[in-house]
Amino acid sequence: MSYCNRLEERNTLTYVLLLLGYCLFLSPLTVSAQTLADRLGYPSGTKLIIVHADDLGETHAVNAAAIKTLEEGSINSASLMVPCPWFPEIADYAKSHPEVDFGLHLTVTSERVYYRWGPVAASDKVPSLLDEYRYFHHDWEHNQHINANEVEIELRAQIERALAMGVRPTHLDSHQYRLIVNGKDLFDVLLRVAHEYKLPVFVTRDWFPDHPYLQESLGPDDIVLDHTVTIGPEVPAEKWAEFYISGLKHLKPGVTEFVIHPGFDDEELRAATRERSTWGAAWRQRDFDFFTSDQFRQILAQDNIKLITWRDLAKMVARK
Amino acid sequence: MSYCNRLEERNTLTYVLLLLGYCLFLSPLTVSAQTLADRLGYPSGTKLIIVHADDLGETHAVNAAAIKTLEEGSINSASLMVPCPWFPEIADYAKSHPEVDFGLHLTVTSERVYYRWGPVAASDKVPSLLDEYRYFHHDWEHNQHINANEVEIELRAQIERALAMGVRPTHLDSHQYRLIVNGKDLFDVLLRVAHEYKLPVFVTRDWFPDHPYLQESLGPDDIVLDHTVTIGPEVPAEKWAEFYISGLKHLKPGVTEFVIHPGFDDEELRAATRERSTWGAAWRQRDFDFFTSDQFRQILAQDNIKLITWRDLAKMVARK
C-alpha cells in the first residue's frame, strides 16, 4: 500500500503543479498580450477549446467511451497509447476514420498494478525504463535514473508502430506528463522527435513558470497553447460538473486544451484501476457524463466558445 | 476477413486432430493396459479427471471467471499466460493462494485482432516469433519459419517472469497447442525447459498417433496423461452440455484432462474476441455455465469420477 500511496502523492503533486499553472493563468499578470488565437488570426478575445481525451488504447472501456464521445461531438481530439494492449482496436478505428484528430499519447510508465504493459522497443534497448519484470516502471521514483537516449529509442518505436498500423497522428503528448515535467533532457528528446516527424507537441504557456526549460527549448515555429484545464484528485465527485463549469465560465481568450479522461465504469475498468481511485473507473465515468451532458453543450453555445483541433492548429500555422 | 478465415481453419484443424485423438481413445484397441492411474496406485478402472481452465491472464473476464470456478470447486487446475496484460492480476492471486494448482500456459502467439500482446523476452532476440508490429504472430502460417532457439529464449523469459512475480507453477502447457503439434523441434524445446525447471508438461497418449515424436521424446520419468477432452467449433451452442455429459459418461479409466475455457460474456471479452466466435465470449460463458452447474457435480458423484490435480500427480510420481 505504501508504494501506491507514494504513487498517488506523486500524481497529486504533478496535478497540483498543473492546477497552480491554471490558477496563474486566471491572474491577468500572466496573460501574454499575444495568444495563439491572435497568432492564428482570430479576433481579439476569441475563446477556443480543444476537448481532448487521453489514454485511448489503455483499456477497451476507455476506447469505447472515447469513440462514443467523438462520434457524438462531445470531444474533438484524443491521443493514443501505443504500447497498451488495446492499441490495435483504436488504431483500427483511427485508420478507418482518418478525419478524426488523433495524436499519440507517448507512454513510458505502466502505472497500474493488476494490468500492465511494457515497451514497444526491444526491452534490452531500454533497461532504465523497465522494472525487474520488464514492464514499464509503475512510476518514476525521485532518484530514478531514466536514460534520455533510451526514451528516444522508445518514442521512435511507438511512433513507427503507429504509422505502420495506419495511424496518421496530428500531435504528440505525454502520458502522466512524464516528458514535460521531468527536466530539460527528456523534453528536448520529445521535441527533437516531434520535429523530425513534423508533429506539434502539447505544451501550454501555463507550464512555463514551473518548468522554464520548456520555453527555452521551444522555437518560434512550435505551437504553444495558451492554457489547459484538467481536473485533479482534490475535486470531490459531487463537485465534478462545478469544476468544469467554472473552468468554462472563467475561460480566458486564446486556445485552451481541456485534458479529460472519459471511460465507462464497468467491470474491466474497475478491475484495471482498483488499487486507487484517482483516474479510476468512477472518475472516468464522471468525465464521460459531464462532457456528454446538455449542460456542457449549452455553455459552449451561450459563451460563444469555439472548438478547434490539433489538425486545425497545424494547418493554420502552416498557412501563415 | 480472409486472414481471419484462415486462422479459424487452422484452429479448427488443430481441434479436429485433438478430437480425433479423443475418438481413438474411445476405441478399446488404443487403451493401454497400464494407465497413469494404474501407475499411481489407484484400483484398476478408476476414473480421474483434471478440470483445467486455460488462458488465465489473457483478459480480466477470464481471470474473474476462473477465480470464481476455482473457489467454488468447479475447476481444480488452470494455467496462466505470462505475456498477457492481465497476468499481474492472476499472478497476484496465485502468490496469495499458493495451494491452487496453477501451471504456465506458455504462449507464443497473439491470436486476436483488436487486443494483442508481445514477447516477454527482448523483441530483438525473438524476431521469428513476431510480426512487423512486434506482436506475436496472430497464428503461424503453414510455411512460417519459427526458430526453435528463439522459442526457448521466450519460454525461459516467461517462466522467469512468473517465478519473479511469486508464481510457483505446478505444470506447463502450450497455448493453442503450438509447442505440441508443430513438430519435434519445438516439443523438444518445451521438454528440455520443463526438465530444467522440474515441471511436468501436459501431454496425453491420445496425441501419440498423430504426433509420434511426442512418444519418442518423452522419457520414463515424464508424466503422460491418459486422455483429454476439449470442445471444438463443430459443437453447436445448444449441444454444449450434451458434449460434456457424453465425455463424462464415456470416460475411460485413467487420468483425463478436461481442457476448458471459462470466461464471462461481458463487454471486455466480447470486444477482445469479436473477430470470430470460436473461443469467444459466448463460448467461454457456456463453459463457465456447464462447469458451475449442478448437473456437472451430480455426474461426478453418480459416476464416481475422482478429481486430481497436477500437484497431486507430480507428488505421487515423486513418491514412487
Image (spheres, coloured by chain):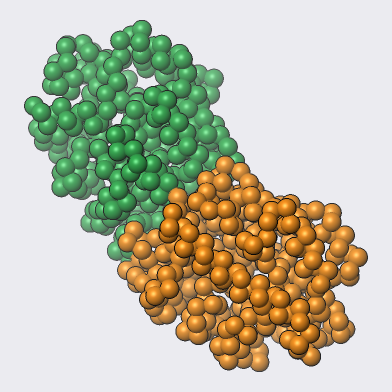
Chain colours: A green, B orange
- In depth, the one of A2 and B149 nearer the eye is B149
Q: Residue furthest top?
A: A302
Q: Image point 16% across, 11% down: which residue?
A: A43
Q: Is residue A236 above or below residue A281?
A: above
Tell whether A128 sits left or right of A40.
right
- Residue A28: percent from left, percent from top: 23, 13
Q: Is residue A51 above or below residue A119?
A: above
**Badge count:** 0
Q: Image point 31% across, 42% down: which residue?
A: A104
Asked whether residue B161 is in view, the answer is no
- In depth, the one of A169 and A200 nearer the eye is A169
Q: Image quadrant for the N terminus of chain B?
A: bottom left
- Identify the image quadrant of residue A93: top left
- In depth, the one of A2 and A277 nearer the eye is A277
- Residue B148: percent from left, percent from top: 42, 80
Asked whether residue B17 is in view, the answer is yes
Q: Image point 60% across, 50% down: which residue?
A: B281
Q: Image point 66% across, 89% down: which residue?
A: B221
Q: Residue furthest right?
A: B302
- Residue A241: percent from left, percent from top: 47, 18
Tell whether A173 sits left or right of B303.
left
- Residue B38: percent from left, percent from top: 81, 86
Q: Image quadrant for the C terminus of chain B?
A: bottom right
Tell whether B76 sits left or right of B283.
right
Tell whether B75 sits left or right of B111.
right
Q: Is residue A98 above or below residue A148?
A: above
- In depth, the one of A173 and B15 nearer the eye is B15
- Identify the image quadrant of residue A9: top left
